Image (tube, grey):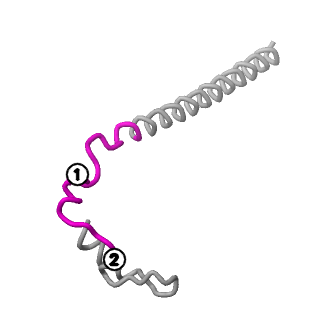
Amino acid sequence: MTEDNNNNNNNNNNNNNNSVLKHNASNNNNTTIFSIVTIVTVCVVSQLTGSVGSITSISNKTTKKVCNVLDYGAIADKKTDIGPAISDAHFDCV
């Protein structure tokens, strides 16, 4: 009878261990799902909600100044670097 009791105890221990493993796996799944939901929620909430960009309308900009990179020293010859002219025009016009 002692041997039967030992076998029953071993079976009970194995069942308990299996239930603990299943419980831990369930907790890991719950943690993963919670993490994903949290990340998605943070991304959605953190999106920009107000206006973005310039507060000056295009119509107001064009009435003030017309910018042409040729007026800032650019030469349209496909050889000359127009970077400085673009930079200067951007600085003055934007």
Q: Nearer the viewer, residue 40 or 55?
A: 55
Q: What segment is highlighted magenta in the picture? A: 43-69
Q: Amino acid at mark 1?
A: Ser
Query: Disc 1 versus disc 2: distance between alpha carbons?
Result: 21 Å
Q: Residue at x 34, y 76 (%)?
A: 69
Q: Which of the numbered marks, if any, corresponds to residue 67? A: none
Quadrant location, the C terminus: bottom left
Q: Which residue is identified by label 1?
A: 57
Q: Which residue is identified by label 2?
A: 87
Q: Looking at the rendering, which quadrant does residue 45 occupy?
A: top left
Q: Amino acid at mark 2?
A: Ser
**Image: 14 above or below 47:** above
Q: Residue at x 59, y 25 (%)?
A: 23
Is residue 16 in the magenta section? Answer: no
Residue 40: image location, x then y, percent? 45, 36
Q: Looking at the rendering, which quadrant does residue 15 occupy?
A: top right
Residue 61: image location, x then y, percent? 22, 59
Q: Residues within 10 Å of mark 2 (few under 14, many from 20)?
A: few
Quadrant location, the N terminus: top right
Is residue 47 in the magenta section? Answer: yes
Q: Nearer the viewer, residue 72 or 30?
A: 72
Q: Residue at x 48, y 37 (%)?
A: 35
